Amino acid sequence: MSELTSKTIAELRDGFRGGEFSAREIAEAYNAAVAAAKLLNAYTVETPDEALAAADIADQARLAGNPLSLSGIPLGIKDLFATIGVDTTAGSHILQGFKPTYESTVTTNLRKAGAGMLGKLNMDEFAMGSSNETSTYGPVISPWRRQGSNVGLTPGGSSGGSAAAVSALIAPGATGTDTGGSIRQPAAFAGICGIKPTYGRCSRWGIVSFASSLDQAGPMARTVRDCAILLEAMAGFDAKDSTSLDLPVPRWEANLSSDLKGKCVGIPREYRIDSVPAEINALWDQGIEWLKDAGATPVEISLPHTKYALPTYYIIAPAEASSNLARYDGVRYGLREDGVKTLDDMYAATRAAGFGAEVKRRIMIGTYVLSAGFYDAYFTKAQRVRALIKQDFAKAFEACDVILTPTAPSAAFGIGETTDPLAMYLNDVFAVPASLAGLPAMSVPGGLDGQGLPLGLHLIGNEFDEQIVLNAGLAIEERAGFTVRPEKWW
Amino acid sequence: MSVSPEQVRHIAKLARIAMSDAELERLVPELNAIIGWVEQLAEVNTDGVEPLTAVIEQKLRLRDDQVTDGNIRDDVLANAPEAQHGFFAVPKVIE
């Protein structure tokens, strides 16, 4: 039933409801595909029994005439989401063996909508990375390869397992999380769609924290419609998250429309960077043409503080991470290093053994910028610049409805090719400003570069306006006609 | 501003991460590169700009003052590396 794995979520849903195939057949096809794709290292845990159990419930619901919105759909879950009784490690050695006794709100919502779980997906340790190379399980290998080459490429990060799984047809959709681009950059690298909603749309409860003022969950799938379907199920008010938006969940799928007549598309001049490959700027120009064809009017806009977004992010995110990751103390859960005398030594030894190099680096930066004497110069300053970045967007949205940019400054790179931390951080140059401003943003595949690797286009909407992001994404999807999938080598 | 090896040692202590001298030595230039890079924020004029406190403006909610998640001791202890008599167990603190 391999053809089942090439269907979109909407097609699976409709085919299942129409009785063309059963939920069990879908789950079995995906379980087999997952088991046969170990070379990608996309899954950290496989849960075929959970997928089958949800499928059997779905099949019964269909016979009883009351299937739910995601009945019959098995999903991959990023290892950052707490899943009851199933290892949840955030890709870190320090959480190895952690089996939550509770379930995250987002995955609870997905289960309540009838979805099953195929397994947990690999990721950069604590979502800190842009290449999936910082995972304690080793890197995910992208299903994509450069033409005529068998060099292993990264699927991007931190939601690299999610991106690789959806792209390689070993999950029809997956959850991701995005702190500074971790849904959008891997979606672009893997030739799929991914949306980060407005901050607060998806509850953070039960998601392992990285930088709480930035962390936001969202779906990754093969089409814009599939993203809308999944996001509707994931989002919603949750009293257990104090920053959860107390707003009804819009009907994003029903309101999808690629007719952009009367809409203005902002093209920020500060995103035109000389060092970005010409192919990427050319795809951006093509994207403008596609949106014009859909009826939209392009307008040049200015986001003057764009160049300060990355340095602002690399103060705020490590600062919040250093606080959040203080909880890994060898006492309550996860790893403990014994064989030291004092409690203080146990903390230090546990954290030394449990955290990888990038996580330590960020905890150190965060601890430094929050330390006595430096707090105002770094952290408060960064929060002031963050306010200016947010104002930039507010002003821009007086003149336009949605903003179009490239998603990432390059296509996927090789594993081990980028070793300088600062060079790695630059991957998120286009993604981070929207994160700092809490805005909904999406990556949609636009085409292939000269080496045959996918490139993404990035849409940013105003607060609460996921709909225009999805609609503009749909307009691009319809015109780009991006249907190419990586050739199976695994 | 740049950090010295002594400062890095102090930060590691604050962060409760044990580090060998070799690790500290390797981190000094890495941290200095990152700190030097983020310091470009100094050139932004932020006079009169309030630091951002909530990325999406909203009121903090109050809930009724009720116990909603008590009586789950065994769940709380389920993942502890060491639990004894219904408590987290740690190396001896007082001699």
Image (cartoon, rainbow, N blue to C red):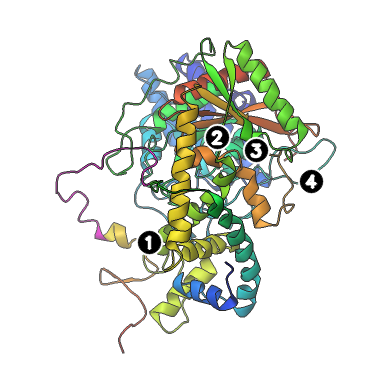
SS of the residue under disc 3? loop
Q: Tell me the kind of residue under disc 2.
A: Leu
**Which chain is indicated by disc 4?**
A
Q: From the top left corner, tell me how far across and down residue A234 is, in percent.
A: 41, 33
* Whether residue B56 is visible: yes
Who is closer to the viewer here, A213 or A105?
Answer: A213
Residue A375: quarter of image? bottom left
Q: Tell me the kind of residue under disc 1.
A: Asn
The mark closer to the camera, 2 or 1, is 2
Q: Which numbered circle lies on residue B79?
A: 1
Q: Earlier in the sequence, mark 4 or mark 3?
A: 4
Who is closer to the viewer here, A137 or A252?
Answer: A252
Residue span colored magenta: B53-73
Residue depicted at 35% across the width and 26% down the height: A249
Q: Which numbered circle lies on residue A151?
A: 4
Question: Eyeballing the image, is A15 above or below B7?
Answer: above
**Which chain is indicated by disc 3?**
A
**Which chain is indicated by disc 1?**
B
Residue pointed to by mark 2:
A303
The mark closer to the camera, 2 or 3, is 2
The mark closer to the camera, 1 or 4, is 4
How crowded pointer 1 is (Cα within 10 Å; few <14, some 14-19, many 20+) is rated as many
User: Does the residue at mark 4 contact the one at mark 3 (Cβ under 8 Å)?
Assistant: no
Rounded to the nearest angstrom, the CA distance separating label 2 from label 1 is: 47 Å
Residue depicted at 51% across the width and 11% down the height: A262
Q: Earlier in the sequence, mark 2 or mark 3?
A: 2
Rounded to the nearest angstrom, the CA distance separating label 1 from label 3 is: 39 Å
Q: From the top left corner, tell me how far across and down residue A108 is, in percent.
A: 36, 38
